[in-house]
Image (cartoon, rainbow, N blue to C red):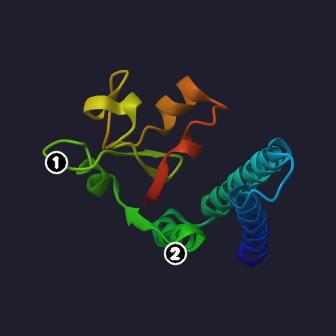
Amino acid sequence: MDLKLFLEFISDIVKEINSDIEKLYSNKTNNKRDVLHHLNSEAMMLDNYIKHFSQSTERIVQDIPSSHQSTFLQQVRPAINGTKTFTIEELAQYNGKNGNPAYVAVNGIVYDVTNNAAWAAATHFGLSAGNDLTTSFASCHAGADILSKLSVVGNLV
């Protein structure tokens, strides 16, 4: 899927989500449960498009010579969500210690876990903030919708 088509799909879904949110705020709907169901459905579709595009991007990256992969990822990932990029060394600074925020990376996306109760003291079941937890996450939370509840702060390159 090319970036333009991907962004069009995402834009359409976001419009639907915003429409549902406005319906809920306005109290002009008779059945909030139907609106919430539709909102949930749109959010899941958005998540699926993002996952699909991420997998497509990873396949493209594998076909690029390793000497150019970092440059490619720095250009593509920020274009997806306009966020900051982090190297593994930069991510390590966000370990939740000495007043620093607590960030973790999963599948190339950096999430803020600073105020997440499951990450009290910037640790979670022996894992520490400031690290790429892709492998650990996959072994513990495969298929779980946990990440969608966290704020995205950037991409790991």
User: Which residue is labeled 2 in the image?
Assistant: 75
Could you tell me which residue is drawn at 50 percent across and 53 percent down?
109
Residue located 33% across and 22% down the image: 126
Amino acid type assigned to the residue bearing label 1 in the image:
Gly
Q: Where is residue 100 in the image (x, y as percent from the top left)?
A: 21, 50
Q: How many labels does the image show?
A: 2
Q: Quadrant of the C terminus?
A: bottom left
| In this picture, residue 118 sits left or right of residue 43 | left
Task: Check the image and name the residue furthest to the top.
Answer: 125
Q: Position of residue 74 (x, y in %)?
A: 47, 70
Q: Is mark 2 on a helix, strand or loop?
A: helix
Task: Specify the quadrant of the image occupied by residue 130.
Answer: top left
Report the residue marked by disc 1: 99
Above or below residue 136? Residue 149 is: below
Quadrant of residue 22 in the image? Answer: bottom right
The reply, left or right, for residue 48 in relation to residue 116 is right
The residue nearer to you, when weighing 127 against 60, is 127
The quarter of the picture where residue 95 lies is: top left
**Label 1 CA crowd tier, 10 Å (few <14, some 14–19, many 20+):** few
